């Protein structure tokens, strides 16, 4: 190889390495992307908005809670439940969807318990019906479960052609559980599953279940018409000296029921908890010539009342037409809204004392 060709080869090699060095320099000088100002790993823990799916399935028409469609596509059962001291604790009471507490003679009350959704297997003790009970049964188109009735009650059951399961008529599903120290009249119970089977056999069921009877809202309890109410106390007239109280449990958003100063629990040990309490004043007077002291009550009179819900109370008006549910309205005539959950309706004579506590202030009427 001569000197000229060697020189050309060396120049070519030098040019090649100079080009490589230039490319490497340009890569190192390329600008870096802007850094994330957040601390390292912060983006991994960043909370994202939680989207809750909207429930569009079937709801219990008495509580507005999500429900099994098969359970609520049935006819409701209304049980006349005993509330004498010997009858407590009652069986299945805490699982009722709706309860009407109504006076009987002597200042005692009966609990008209409505079961539709996730009903218990057994309920009781069970007692007799009165004519004004029948108005509430028909307002829900329910099947009545009872043990006997007053003479007028029997006449109206037959004249109204009501669907009933009466132990004294030999109906299916009843049994006695004689407990020590408990009088015989407080020992009758019933199996709801056996009654459901008999309803199918008698073709008492509906093709479709009942519709929602009231308006429900999660925001119930807000507005200028509401006041604070951590306690509701209802004193029923009569020699029994019967008082019921509801204490608001703010952490659960429900009222816990007491009879006097004792928690009212069912046989399973569950204290009765209630989302809404409606107190309605219904005209009541002694039945003329009745030696047992029975009452007449006008369930279609309408009148004043109170709604207690979510730690608040407001005044309401109530109305009821035959074969239609009770309706509850505010001063503007619009239907009030209830919270989702179990409702108890305290039906009281006008001379009952209804007391609510509003923090440091009290109201009594």
Image (tube, helix red, strand yellow):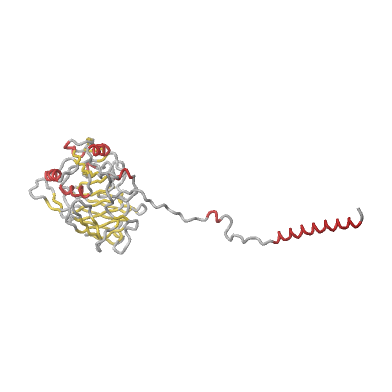
Q: Which residue of the protein is positioned furthest toward the right in this rendering?
A: 2
Q: Residue at x 74, y 59 (%)?
A: 23
Q: Viewed as shown, does residue 156 lie left or right of 95?
A: left
Q: Residue at x 81, y 59 (%)?
A: 15
Number of numbered discs visible in the structure rendering: 0
Residue 217, image x, y percentages: 33, 56
- Between 252 and 68, the one nearer to me in the picture: 68
Q: Viewed as shown, does residue 344 lie left or right of 297?
A: right
Residue 244, image x, y percentages: 24, 51
Residue 103, image x, y percentages: 18, 49
- Between 97 and 333, the one nearer to me in the picture: 333
- Between 249 and 275, the one nearer to me in the picture: 275
Residue 100, image x, y percentages: 23, 49
In the rendered image of this protein, does residue 346 appear above or below residue 184? Answer: below
Quarter-of-image position of residue 75: top left
Quarter-of-image position of residue 149: top left
* Quarter placement of the C terminus: bottom left
Q: Residue at x 55, y 56 (%)?
A: 43
Q: Which residue of the protein is positioned furthest toward the left in this rendering?
A: 289
């Amino acid at each position: 190889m001569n000197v000229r060709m060697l020189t050309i080869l060396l120049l070519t090699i030098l040019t090649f390495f100079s080009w490589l060095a230039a490319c490497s320099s340009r890569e190192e000088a390329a600008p870096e992307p802007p850094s994330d100002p957040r601390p390292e790993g912060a983006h991994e823990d960043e909370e994202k908005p939680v989207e809750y799916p909207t429930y569009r399935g079937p709801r219990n028409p008495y509580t507005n809670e999500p429900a099994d469609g098969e359970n609520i596509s049935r006819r409701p059962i209304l049980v006349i439940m005993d509330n004498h001291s010997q009858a407590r604790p009652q069986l299945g009471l805490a699982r009722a969807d709706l309860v009407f507490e109504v006076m009987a003679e002597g200042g005692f009350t009966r609990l008209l318990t409505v079961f539709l959704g996730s009903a218990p297997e057994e309920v009781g003790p069970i007692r007799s019906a009165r004519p004004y009970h029948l108005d509430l049964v028909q307002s829900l188109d329910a099947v009545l479960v009872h043990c006997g009735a007053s003479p007028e009650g029997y006449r109206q059951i037959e004249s109204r052609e009501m669907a009933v399961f009466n132990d004294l008529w030999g109906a299916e599903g009843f049994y006695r559980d004689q407990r020590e120290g408990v009088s015989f009249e407080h020992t009758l119970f019933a199996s709801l599953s056996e009654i459901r089977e008999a309803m199918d056999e008698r073709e008492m069921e509906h093709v479709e279940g009942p519709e929602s009877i009231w308006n429900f809202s999660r925001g119930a309890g807000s507005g200028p018409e509401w006041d604070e109410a951590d306690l509701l106390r209802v004193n029923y007239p009569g020699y029994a000296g019967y008082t019921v109280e509801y204490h608001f449990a703010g952490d659960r958003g429900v009222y816990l029921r007491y009879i006097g100063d004792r928690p009212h629990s069912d046989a399973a040990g569950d204290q009765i908890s209630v989302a809404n309490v409606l107190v309605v004043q219904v005209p009541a007077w002694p039945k003329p010539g009745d030696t047992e002291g029975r009452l007449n009550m006008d369930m279609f009179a309408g009148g004043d009342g109170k709604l207690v819900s979510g730690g608040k109370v407001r005044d309401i008006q109530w109305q009821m037409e035959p074969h239609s549910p009770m309706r509850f309205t505010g001063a503007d005539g619009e239907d009030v809204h209830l919270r989702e959950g179990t409702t108890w309706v305290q039906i009281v004579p006008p001379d009952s004392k209804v007391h609510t506590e509003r923090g440091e202030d009290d109201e009594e009427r």
